[in-house]
Image (cartoon, rainbow, N blue to C red):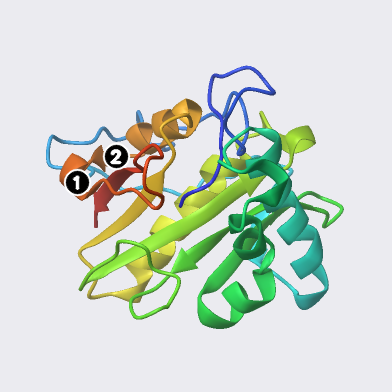
């Protein structure tokens, strides 16, 4: 499941990746707009806030990122069973994610971890919905004190860049909780479109996860 994020939502609302996220246009003109097929009509230039950098996670950061991710989901009320939810174990399993997928972190000028995301290439056991020719990203989360700085959006852009650089992929996909309204705005702004035919439910009786795609 893609993680909690924010956009124009106030800090503390249900979306773990950062309120008031912003998109910067290309220097040559306005930001490209998505067409109706979910394919961007112009380049998606990775734009991170000036004080935020994106890089692969380091082993010494596994525990910190696991706690940031777990707390984001837990504190924003996104887990059906609260502190007893078995999904917390997966959220904290950064070492295994890094071995079986690619875990990226956002860090500030002092190299402190602000949040992270799992980029899931084809064939990874961490894929939820990706099929042939598709990449995926999951567990996007930003610490509460780092929200509102464009961090979540920068992490999403980094995943899109990796999918495009891999070559041979047709799209990148994700699943997201219905309550993550700020995250949904980020995805739409970056050209993702809804794929309701792929929505799925990880728990019987729980809310279905919404799915999005971006054609590469």
Q: Position of residue 4 (x, y in %)?
A: 56, 40
Q: Where does the image place residue 113, in percent across and percent down from the top left?
A: 77, 54
Residue 46 vertical position relative to residue 127 in the rendered view, above or below: above
The residue singled out by tag 2 in the image is: 191
**Residue for point 31% across, 55% down:** 173
Give the residue at mark 1: 39
Identity of the residue drawn at 48% across and 65% down: 119
Please give left or right for residue 39 compared with residue 23 in the image.
Answer: left
Q: Reply above or below: 105 against 195.
A: below
> Which percent across, then down, holds residue 78?
57, 38
Q: Is residue 145 left or right of residue 122?
A: right
Looking at this view, is 202 or 34 the one in front?
A: 202
Could you tell me how far apart the alpha carbons at marks 1 and 2 are, in whole angstroms? Answer: 7 Å
Is residue 112 or residue 211 the one in the foreground?
A: 211
Q: Earlier in the sequence, mark 1 or mark 2?
A: 1
Image position of 197 with respect to 165: above or below: above
User: For residue 65, what is the image quadrant?
Assistant: bottom right
Q: Quadrant of residue 31?
A: top left
Please report contact status of discs 1 and 2: CB closer than 8 Å, yes or no.
yes
């Amino acid at each position: 499941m893609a993680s909690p994020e924010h956009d124009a939502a106030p800090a503390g609302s249900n979306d773990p990746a950062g309120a008031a996220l912003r998109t910067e246009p290309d220097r040559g003109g306005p930001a490209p707009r998505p067409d109706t097929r979910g394919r961007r009509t112009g380049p998606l230039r990775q734009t991170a806030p000036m004080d935020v950098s994106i890089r692969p996670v380091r082993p010494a950061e596994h525990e910190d990122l696991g706690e940031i991710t777990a707390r984001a989901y837990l504190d924003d009320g996104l887990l059906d069973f609260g502190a007893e939810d078995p999904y917390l174990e997966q959220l904290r399993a950064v070492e295994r994610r890094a071995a079986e997928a690619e875990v990226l972190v956002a860090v500030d000028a002092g190299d402190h971890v602000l949040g992270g995301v799992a980029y899931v290439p084809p064939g990874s056991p961490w894929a939820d919905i990706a099929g042939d020719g598709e990449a995926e990203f999951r567990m996007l989360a930003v610490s509460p004190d780092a929200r509102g700085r464009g961090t979540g959006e920068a992490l999403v852009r980094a995943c899109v860049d990796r999918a495009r650089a891999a070559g041979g992929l047709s799209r990148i996909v994700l699943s997201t909780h219905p309550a993550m309204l700020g995250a949904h705005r980020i995805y739409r702004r970056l050209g993702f479109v809804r794929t309701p035919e792929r929505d799925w439910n990880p728990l019987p009786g729980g809310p279905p996860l919404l799915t999005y795609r971006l054609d590469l």
